[in-house]
Image (spheres, rainbow, N blue to C red):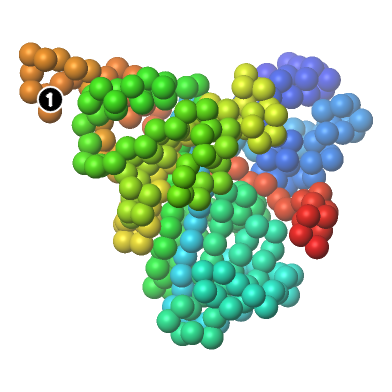
Amino acid sequence: MEGLWLNDTDWIDHFKEQRTQYGVSQNQLAVMAGVSREYISRLESGKVTLTEEIRVKLTDALDKLNPENPLEMVLDYVRIRFPTQDVKHIVEDILKIRLDVMIHEDFGFYSYSEHYVLGDVFVLTSPDEEKGTLLELKGKGCRQMEAFLYGQGRDWYSFFRRCLDEDCVFKRIDLALNDRVRLLDIPCLMRKCDAGECITVFRKFRMYRSGLFISGHEEENAAGMGHTLYAGAFDSDLYFCIYEKDYEQLARSGTPLEDTEVKNRFEIRLKNERAYFAVYDLVSYEDAERTAFGIINRYMRIVDRDNRRAREDWPLNSMWAVFIGGRRDRLKLTAKPEPYTLQKTLNWLSHQV
């Protein structure tokens, strides 16, 4: 309704302020609206004329990226093995990317002999029939894949259904819950675990403060994580990683803590059969709340000590109660599409070539 009474300049100023409040970058908005980032920049600086068509398009795009809920879920790691050596089929029919735009390298990893890569999207292959074809998307790869999916008129649900049709094996899936307002106080959570106020089926906890190096475990984000809590064994098929995301961004890019969009992150890291059942639940119900908190509530809960009762009857901690669903909107699976830019290509050439 605001667009009906604001003049163009006021509307643009209001729109920019709202975009900033939502924590949506010009890149993310451009991908969702189907325009260039440069166009968004020129529009917000008053260098191009606002039309009704672009007003509707931008409003619709920003609504889709609206973080009304302080908690959102994103896919942060996807590794899928397909029982075929037909790379062209996987790339062009499943990913819907032209194989000839991917770079071919005659080496691989995870004992695969070669791979194809486009930005941060990796497809690995091997002459060994048992290995089939492997798709790997790390964090940036997931964001890039979301840009492709949006352009194709698809989402993660439809993509995973297509993968399931191929009788694929989900080797690893990370469900990342982004906490924008610090629903969880992670240092407090760690103290609760130390004090025995965590009811859990996990046998192991690891806690790290101020980004201490994690000996014997490869963790890309270890440095600068601030407080980090691991629940479960690293080599198990399911464990949680809960950390202060704003400290990670401070260490990685120098972003001030108060300027970070995501304060905390709660990652559910699943492998093999656990990953399969999580994906199957997601595509069956399209309900991120059900899938994520079905897992979390099954494996742990934070309580307040009450020595008058048996430990299993201790009352649920109020902070934890809000996090798992009390007094907030339902969790949604959110896309944060980011295209692979020319600058990223130049960075790759500079550092890798």
Tell me which amino acid carries mark 1: Arg
Task: Name the residue carrying label 1.
Answer: 311
Which secondary structure, mark 1? helix
Q: Nearer the viewer, residue 211 or 304?
A: 211
Which residue is drawn at the image coordinates 42% and 25% (left, top)? 186
**Relative to residue 284, is residue 260 depicted above or below?**
above
Residue 146 in sight here: no
Residue that protrudes farthest toward the right in the picture: 47
Badge 1: few (under 14), some or many (20 or more) residues near its Cα, within 10 Å? some
Q: Nearer the viewer, residue 142 or 22?
A: 142
| Count of marks overlaid on the render | 1
Q: Quadrant of the N terminus?
A: top right
336 relative position to 215: left or right: right
Where in the figure is residue 198, as x and y percent of width and height?
Answer: 25, 29
Residue 104 in sight here: yes
Which residue is drawn at the image coordinates 46% and 73% (left, top)? 82
Which residue is drawn at the image coordinates 46% and 45% (left, top)? 215
91 relative position to 69: left or right: right
